[in-house]
Image: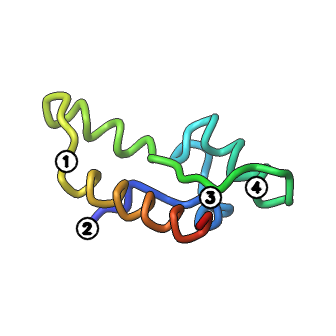
């Protein structure tokens, strides 16, 4: 199974190429303690797959997004 979704806290060592520019910036700001609300990044691999599979979202991606939202709900109460 490919991992397409990372919480900010899971991604500080991942590359800018994988996270995209905005995602990478948010992860880095979060990792150095700046006041960034909890969040997650959908990787550039997910975007590539979207186009590869006829502009449709894989069930695998949907499941990971729902899981990330659930984790954010737990973090934020």
Tell which tag, 1 or 2, sits nearer the viewer.
1
Q: Residue 77, percent across and down?
A: 59, 67
- Gap in angstroms between the C-alphas marked 4 and 3: 7 Å
Q: Nearer the viewer, residue 69 or 60?
A: 69
Q: State yes or no: discs 4 and 3 in contact (Cβ < 8 Å).
A: yes
Q: State yes or no: discs 4 and 1 in contact (Cβ < 8 Å).
A: no
The residue at the point 60 percent across, 52 percent down is 15
Q: Residue 74, percent across and down?
A: 53, 71
The residue indicated by pointer 3 is: 8
Instruction: Tell which circle, 4 or 2, labels the residue nearer the N-terminal end.
Output: 2
The residue indicated by pointer 1 is: 58
The residue indicated by pointer 4 is: 30
Instruction: Tell which circle, 3 or 2, labels the residue nearer the N-terminal end.
Output: 2
The residue indicated by pointer 2 is: 1
Tell which tag, 3 or 2, sits nearer the viewer.
3
Residues packed near mark 1 inside 10 Å, few (<14), some (14 to 19) or many (20 plus): few
The residue at the point 35 percent across, 36 percent down is 47
- Gap in angstroms between the C-alphas marked 4 and 1: 28 Å
Q: Residue 35, percent across and down?
A: 83, 51
Dot 4: element: helix
Total numbered labels placed on residues in the image: 4
The residue at the far front in this view is: 77
**From the viewer's perspective, is 3 left or right of 10?**
left
């Amino acid at each position: 199974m490919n991992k397409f979704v990372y919480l900010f806290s899971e991604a500080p060592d991942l590359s800018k190429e994988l996270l995209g520019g905005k995602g990478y910036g948010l992860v880095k700001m979060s990792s150095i303690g700046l006041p960034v609300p909890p969040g997650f990044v959908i990787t550039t691999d997910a975007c590539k797959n979207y186009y590869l599979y006829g502009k449709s979202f894989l069930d695998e991606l949907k499941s990971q997004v729902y899981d990330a939202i659930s984790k954010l709900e737990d973090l934020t109460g």
